[in-house]
Amino acid sequence: AFRRESKGVSLIIDIQNCLKAQESKGYEHWAKINNLKQASATLNYLTENNLLKYADLEAKMADLTSSYQKTGSDLKKFEKRLKQVQLLIKHISQYQRTKPVYDQYRKAKKRDEYFKQHSADITIYEASRDTLKAMQTGDKLPGLSSLVSEQERLVQEQQRLYDERHKLDKDRKKIETMKRNVDSILGIGQERMEANQEVVKDNNRE
């Protein structure tokens, strides 16, 4: 199999030289599992993305993987906050809508009778009041209008992160495929297997 002298050598030249060596074991293996069209596509991808060294290819793949993971982590944070905001909006809205009913209930002379007529709203009020108290972390809960604005911003950011994560995933899978192609062309996997076999043999001799 063709062997790279160092990671500093041009990856493009490495691949081109390897493809020219048609009698080599590495090329025969490549020819069996791929075709020249795939090899050409791999070379074009490397050139277009300025991945001219094997180390550049590894670094780019690591960077895409890291960015993909970070975007996923950011997305979880925004989704968690969005759920909190939506819950606050729900209970503040319910609280404001049912508070006049509850105030009248507190003032009513015949509370039992009033409760029977407005039990649903009173129950909703008490549930929303208790939920808001549990969610309150500062002296005062944010206003409904500010929460609605924050919700809109969070939804937009959530969609942006969804789109970014989708693109990163697509790019990550693409570069993983290109690296597998490169490794197959250069016989890198075969080299590692042969090296491991040599280590086993040496250990057995000992």
Image (spheres, rainbow, N blue to C red):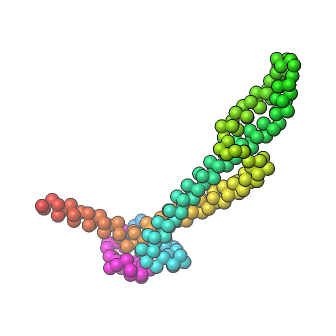
Locate residue 8 relative to residue 129 in the image: left or right: left
Name the residue: 74% across, 47% down.
Answer: 142
Q: Nearer the viewer, residue 144 or 161?
A: 144
Taking 148 as reference, is 15 above or below it?
below
Residue 16 visible? The answer is no
Q: Nearer the viewer, residue 6 or 26?
A: 6
Name the residue: 17% across, 64% down.
Answer: 202
Name the residue: 42% across, 74% down.
Answer: 55
Q: Where residue 114 appears, x then y in whole percent?
A: 85, 21
Location of the N terminus by quadrant is: bottom left
Q: Which image quadrant is residue 168 in?
A: bottom right
Q: Nearer the viewer, residue 43 or 167?
A: 167
Location of the C terminus by quadrant is: bottom left
Locate residue 99 relative to residue 151 in the image: left or right: right
Say how many tags the image has. 0
Residue 179 visible? The answer is yes
Q: Where residue 147 appears, x then y in whole percent?
A: 74, 49
Q: Is residue 192 within the magenta segment?
A: no
Q: Residue furthest left?
A: 206
Part of the protein shown in magenta: 1-29
Q: Where residue 111 appears, x then y in whole percent?
A: 83, 19
Q: Where residue 100 appears, x then y in whole percent?
A: 85, 33
Q: Which image quadrant is residue 170 in?
A: bottom right
Name the residue: 78% across, 47% down.
Answer: 144
Locate residue 206 relative to residue 133 in the image: left or right: left
Locate residue 84 relative to residue 18 in the image: left or right: right
Taking 104 as reference, is 113 above or below it?
above
Q: Nearer the viewer, residue 195 or 106?
A: 106
Q: Is residue 20 within the magenta segment?
A: yes
